[in-house]
Amino acid sequence: MPDLEMRGAERWRWVGRLLPREVRERVFEPAFEDLKYAWVVGRTDRAMPFPVHVAVTWLACLPIVVPRALFRDGHLTRLGRAAVIAGLLFIGAALLVSNVADSYASYDP
């Protein structure tokens, strides 16, 4: 029985491939192995399905991945610059829309 559960759990390893290699090897794979062992042995909450456990483990890696994707050696990466520009454009558009909405609200024909 544990071998069948192990193979079923193993198919979720592909989720780690969505992470950068360094983070996958140092953080996700050890956590996935611990999670898989705890699942097979029965030390985890079975009310929550295994894919949800894997998703939570993957999401826990994001605080490590996001800063590494945006900054490298103290400087912004291309993705970081694009994120800053997109954020500024979004804030500018929101300010423009709010300004236009205020002028329409005070318009009295």
Image (spheres, grey):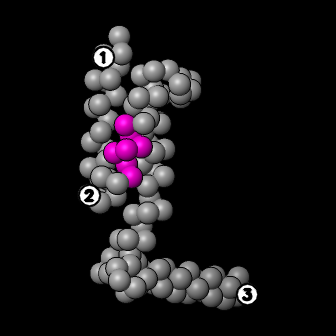
- Tag nearer the camera, 3 or 1: 1
The question of residue 29 being in magenta is answered with: yes
Q: Nearer the viewer, residue 26 or 53?
A: 26
Farthest top residue?
Answer: 1
The image quadrant where one finds the C terminus is bottom right
Mark 2 touching mark 1, by CB under 8 A?
Answer: no
Image vertical order of residue 18 relative to residue 99, above or below: above
Q: Position of residue 87 (x, y in %)?
A: 47, 80
Residue 93 visible somewhere in the drawing: no
Residue 106's label in the rendered image is 3
Residue 3's label in the rendered image is 1
Q: Indicate which disc, 3 or 2, sits on the residue closer to the N terminus.
A: 2
Mark 3 touching mark 1, by CB under 8 A?
Answer: no
Per the rendered image, the range of residues in magenta is 27-33
Residue under the point 42% across and 48% down: 58
Location of residue 84 (image quadrant): bottom left
Considering the numbered disc 1 on the image, is that residue within a helix, a strand or a loop? helix
Q: Indicate which disc, 3 or 1, sits on the residue closer to the N terminus.
A: 1
